[in-house]
Image (cartoon, helix red, strand yellow):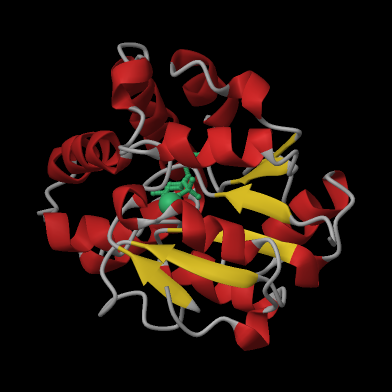
Amino acid sequence: MIKKGFIFDLDGVIVDTAKYHFLAWKKLANSIGIDFTEHQNEQLKGVSRIESLKKILKWGDITLSEEDFNRLMADKNTNYLSYIAKMDESEILPDVIKVMQFLIDKKQPMALGSASKNSIEILNKVNLFNQFDAIVDGNAVTKAKPDPEVFLKAAEAIQIKPENCIVFEDSVAGIQAANKANMISIGIGESSVLNEADVVFRDFTEMSLDFLEKLLTTRKSQLKEK
Ligand code: B16
Ligand code: MG
C-alpha cells in the first residue's frame, strides 16, 4: 500500500475558532465605525489576518496609515488570544479524535496546514500538538490560500508526494489550494459552499471508517462518492 499523508486545516476543521475571530473582528470593525456581520465573517474563513483586515477596511471604505493598520491588527490578535486562552479539549470538534485515532492506528502521517499564526498556541490548548508529524502554519508561508504553498510545504515536511495527500478543509480558498496542489480535497461544511471539493461532509461524524479506509487506496481522479 502506498503511504498517504493527511493534512488538516485548523480553524473550522479541528476547532471552531471562527466564533472567536468573529468576536474579535467585530469589536475592531465597530471601533472604527464599520458594521460587521456573520455573513462577512464567513468570507474571512481561511483568509490570513492581514488580508482579513484589508477586506474589512474595504467594506467600510476606510483607508489607514501603515502604523494604524499594524496597530489594529495587533489589537485584534490580543483580543482573539484572550478567547484562545480559555480553550480546552472540550472545543475539539465532534469525531476529530475518531479520525485521528484511525490514522494513528494505520500509521499514516499527519500534518497541520493552517493560515493561522496562532496554531501552536491553539493546538497546545486543546492538547493535540503532539499528534502531528509536521505543523505548517501562517508563520511558515509567504502566500495565503488559495495558493497551494501551505499544503505543498506540509507534504514536503511529512515526505509524501502531493498526489498522495488528502486535505481536510472548511474554506473555499483552502479547497482551491488543495486542488491546485493536486491533493484530494475533502470539504468539511456545506456542500453548496464547498462545491469544488472532491467530497464534502457536514462534519467528521458523517465520515465513516469505510470511507477513511477507501482514502488509503484511492486516487483523486477515482474519488467520486462518500
Ligand atoms: P490568525 P485556518 C485561518 O485559520 C482562519 O480561518 C482565518 O479566519 C484567520 O484569519 C487565519 O487563520 C489567520 O489566523 O489571525 O490566528 O493568524 O482555517 O487556515 O486554520
Ligand atoms: Mg479553516
Q: Is residue 146 visible?
A: no
156 is higher (above) or lower (below) than 40: above
210 is higher (above) or lower (below) than 96: below
Viewed as shown, does residue 5 lie left or right of 35?
right
Q: Position of residue 107 (x, y in %)?
A: 75, 38
Quadrant of the rendered structure where residue 71 is? top left
Q: Position of residue 31 (x, y in %)?
A: 16, 38
Viewed as shown, does residue 32 lie left or right of 137?
left
Q: Position of residue 199 (x, y in %)?
A: 44, 74
Q: Position of residue 32 (x, y in %)?
A: 18, 44
Viewed as shown, does residue 2 lie left or right of 189?
right
Q: Is residue 165 visible?
A: yes
169 is higher (above) or lower (below) than 126: below
Q: Nearer the viewer, residue 76 or 147?
A: 147
Point 30% across, 64% down: residue = 43
Quadrant of the rendered structure where residue 133 is? top right
Viewed as shown, does residue 108 lie left or right of 8?
right
Total numbered labels: 0
Point 54% across, 22% down: residue = 128
Which quarter of the rendered picture does the C terminus lie within? Answer: bottom left
Q: Nearer the viewer, residue 225 or 143?
A: 225
Q: Nearer the viewer, residue 66 or 125?
A: 125
Point 85% across, 56% down: residue = 160
Point 49% across, 62% down: residue = 211
